[in-house]
Amino acid sequence: QVQLVESGGGLVQPGGSLRLSCAASGSIFSINTMGWYRQAPGKQRELVAIITSSGATNYADSVKGRFTISRDNAKNTVSLRMSSLKPEDTVVYYCNEYIRETGQSSYKGYWGRGTQVTVSS
């Protein structure tokens, strides 16, 4: 059973920084694309940033230049460094990973349970 566990959310003042991490565990053979999404109440979940297995990245326009996604393949972890945080960044953040389990031939998408980020003075 694969599980994703996020950490690092919390309360930060406008202009501050936070680092989110997401660790995958279980019978993992390999991980393809990893990403972070966020969802405000009553709205659709939206892409924040993704990173491919080769290290290519893509960001939502709203976070370009402020957020940086990275991965540690040895630890099956994806991180999101968030800087210059704004009140509008206040939402729940979810990690997503496409994982091929041991003994399986295809990748499947998994989600973490989410971590709250609140930007407020």
Image (spheres, helix red, strand yellow):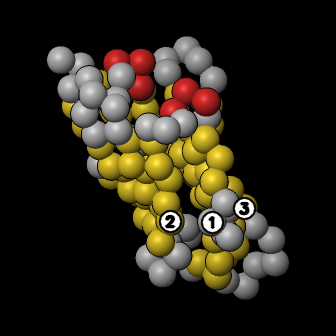
Q: In this orientation, does residue 47 appear? A: yes
Q: Disc number at residue 55? A: 1
Q: Nearer the viewer, mark 3 or mark 2?
A: 2
Q: Which residue is mark 2?
A: 71
The residue depicted at 65 percent of the width and 77 percent of the height is 30
Question: In percent of the image, x 72 and y 61: which residue is there?
Answer: 108
Mark in front: 3 vs 1: 1
Q: Amino acid at mark 1?
A: Gly
Please name the residue shown 34% across and 18% down the image: 87
Residue 118 seen in the figure: no
Q: On screen, 99 above or below 20?
A: below
Few, some or many residues within 10 Å of mark 2 (<14, 14–19, 20+):
many
Gap between marks 3 and 2 measured at Cα? 18 Å
**How far apart in space, not on screen, are marks 1 and 2 (Cα)?**
8 Å
Residue at 50% across, 65% down: 71
Name the side, left or right, on which 101 lies relative to 113.
right
Q: What residue is disc 3 on?
A: 108
Q: Position of residue 3 (x, y in %)?
A: 50, 63
Under circle 3, the secondary element is strand
Q: Are marks 3 and 1 in contact (CB under 8 Å)?
A: no
The quarter holding residue 102 reads bottom right
Earlier-in-chain disc, 3 versus 2: 2
Indicate whether 107 appears above or below 44. below
Which of marks 2 and 1 precedes in the sequence?
1
